[in-house]
Amino acid sequence: MGGSGLTPADYLKKILTARVYDVAIESNLEIAKNLSQRLGNTVLLKREDQQPVFSFKLRGAYNKMAHLTPAQLKKGVICASAGNHAQGVALSGRKLGTRSVIVMPTTTPQVKVDAVRALGGEVVLSGESYSDAYTHAAALQKREGLTFVHPFDDPDVIAGQGTIAMEILRQLQSLGTTRLDAVFVAIGGGGLISGVANYIKAVRPEVKVIGVQTNDSDAMLQSVQAGERITLPDVGLFADGTAVKLVGEETYRVASALVDEYVVVDTDAVCAAIKDIFVDTRSIVEPSGALAVAAVKQYVAKHKTKGQTYAAILCGANMNFDRLRFVAERAEVGEEREALFAVTIPEERGSFRRFCELIGDLPGTPRNVTEFNYRIHNEREAHVFVGLTTQGKGESTRIAKTLGKQGFKTLDLTHDDLAKEHIRHMVGGHSSLSSDERLMRFIFPERPGALLKFLNLMRPNWNISLFHYRNQGADYGRILVGMQVPPKDDKAFTQFLGTLGYPCVEETSNPVYRLFLKS
């Protein structure tokens, strides 16, 4: 598609005459009230997650297909896709009464395969990657005389996506303003930003068009910087909707000429943005759908802007449900409302309590413990993995220094991917020092002082040999504690549990404990 020679004025005509509203809706443009107040700038959300297939992709797919000749429609269309484009083509095919063949990798989740079939698409599974599926689709296209509907590198597809920018500028007036300083657009292959940039620069050239990519899938940025299209050897799969190794020829040409700036965001920032969007809309977007909001936050923090108006396109909401746990886990760290540390404390009586009291006395607003993982290690010192609430960026460094000055050697893990993805779940194991250990599963009330009450009621000669806690956002916390209680203290231990009054279950005889934790 490279060298089409179409100017923004040419694209403007194509966008104004695009046929998208047979299948697409004019999605809402909403003010993100909470986020706007927090950032000191007006953030507008373009709700493409509201489309019938929960993504903007059907705009471009339908516009391309609606411009085909009757003879082409009679033969049918084909595409290669594992995601939102597949659903857009399938829905468009059903609307136009034409056959739509969707080649998907064999690794595609069944829920997406079922969604395409439910829309009338003929699913062909081939290969383990998009590239494999694309190769098979090209072969089928030639053999059966089908028309290929490219997910991004086609002027008609680009024009369909450009209708989003047309709506944004028109909808500003319904919000009582014409001000728009920048539009933030996620980039995969580049179809969406090409359409948006062409319309914006033709109608409102003073408005910045800012492209957004993840740090592990930034093919467009690398290509623009190199002055030629760059093929990435690998792409990250968290934001799978924008995980493209090679951008289009036409989209590269347009982006090189019209995109003002690029912002690169990481996984934690995307997770935090998903949460921000949920707080303002009560909707959950997919990772790629949150890229634009993550970039707005990063842009404001970098440039210290105030009073400006930014539009962020929420480009999709086809979220895999099983990803939500990961998103919730990383959102607080991405916002830097949680800091993670490895702290070494002396293995001596009272040190655990002294450490907990120190946390309560740390400077700043009252801090809550969000996570605490510990397993008795040796006779001299103990290593704990601990999470604390924070109020903003940079606090983790100051907390680490404060803990260090109080005699607790501290390592800041807030930005350590190994710690966040794996080690936090692996603190534990067998210990030769855990004699007379009883394993108890408690439910603690989520309120200040609950842990100290537990520690103060314990007998001084009972040692904590294991502790695991992670805040799950409920009004109670589930805690696993290993306590070294001599058999002669069984009666006293029973009395302790009664006085404590927290619901508990003893797991000392649990076979899982005996396999993985008991010495």
Image (cartoon, helix red, strand yellow):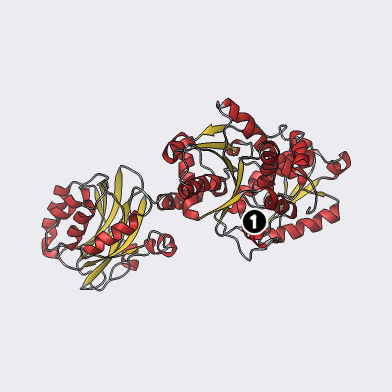
Expressed as whole percent of the image width and height from the top left, the position of residue 342 reads: 32, 64
Instruction: Please rate how many residues cluster around mark 1, counting C-alpha atoms within 10 Å: few if below 14, some from 14 to 19, many from 20.
Output: many
Between 51 and 249, the residue placed more toward the observer is 249
Between 9 and 72, the residue placed more toward the observer is 9
Expressed as whole percent of the image width and height from the top left, the position of residue 244 reads: 64, 56
* Circle 1 residue: 220
Q: Is residue 6 left or right of residue 198?
A: right
Q: Identify which residue is drawn at 28% across, 61% down.
A: 401
Residue 139 occupies quadrant: bottom right
Extreme-front residue of the structure: 206
User: Vertically, is 339 above or below 205?
Assistant: below
The answer to whether residue 181 shows anywhere in this view is: yes
Q: Identify which residue is drawn at 37% across, 62% down.
A: 413
Between 174 and 238, the residue placed more toward the observer is 174
Extreme-right residue of the structure: 71
SS class of the residue under badge 1?
A: helix
Expressed as whole percent of the image width and height from the top left, the position of residue 285 reads: 53, 43
Q: Is residue 385 left or right of residue 90?
A: left
Q: Is residue 511 left or right of residue 71?
A: left
The answer to whether residue 106 shows anywhere in this view is: no
Expressed as whole percent of the image width and height from the top left, the position of residue 149 reads: 76, 48
Q: Amino acid at mark 1?
A: Met
Q: Identify which residue is drawn at 49% across, 40% down.
A: 277
User: Vertically, is 44 above or below 381?
Assistant: above
